[in-house]
Amino acid sequence: MAELHVELVAADRKVWSGKASLVVARTSSGEIGIMPGHQPLLGVLASGPVTIRTTGEGADGAAGKNGTVIAAVHGGFISFSDNKLSLLTEIAELSYEIDVERAERALENAKAEQDAAAERRADVRLRAVAVAH
């Protein structure tokens, strides 16, 4: 089975690293799927869930149901070349790390305060959890 090596890196840590057969992410141009052998790519990541279909466990042992890892990504860059995919972001959270109640409270507070950026961050977190389940 063809694989690509994936690195999901936030400003403060390596979030996930491992082998995958498919990665789906949202870019400034729309949603994109990357599979082994994809043409080289450099793009801007939009905030949203990233889905990684693994072909084994990642370096941290984290693989969701059916070998799928879901992360909430808050902007950044995506780069693919030679079957190596890098997702570089300021903030990224694996779906199982997200406290749903806290994200729901943050969404309510952001709406009440009319803070569009905070509302978008909370919404991305909740969508990542929803995709994972």
Image (tube, rainbow, N blue to C red):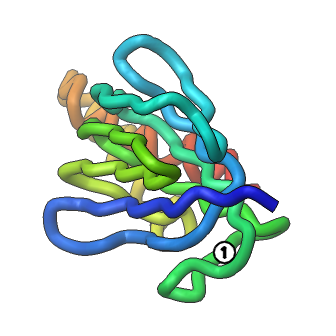
The answer to whether any part of residue 44 appears in the image is: yes
Establish if 96 lies above or below 3.
below
Figure disc tally: 1
Q: Tell me the quadrant of the picture where the C terminus can be found.
A: bottom right
Type of the residue with mark 1 = Ala
In the image, residue 90 lies at what x, y percent? Answer: 19, 51
Residue 117: which quarter of the image?
A: top left
Determine the residue positioned at 53% across, 45% down: 50
Residue 3: which quarter of the image?
A: bottom right
Establish if 67 lies above or below 58.
above
Q: On the rendered structure, is 50 left or right of 54? A: left
Determine the residue positioned at 76% across, 68% down: 67
Establish if 123 lies above or below 54.
above
In the image, residue 93 lies at what x, y percent? Answer: 40, 61
Of 125 and 58, which appears nearest the observer?
58
User: What residue is pinned by disc 1?
Assistant: 63
Q: Tell me the quadrant of the picture where the N terminus can be found.
A: bottom right
The answer to whether any part of residue 104 appears in the image is: no
Establish if 46 lies above or below 74.
above
Determine the residue positioned at 69% across, 64% down: 54
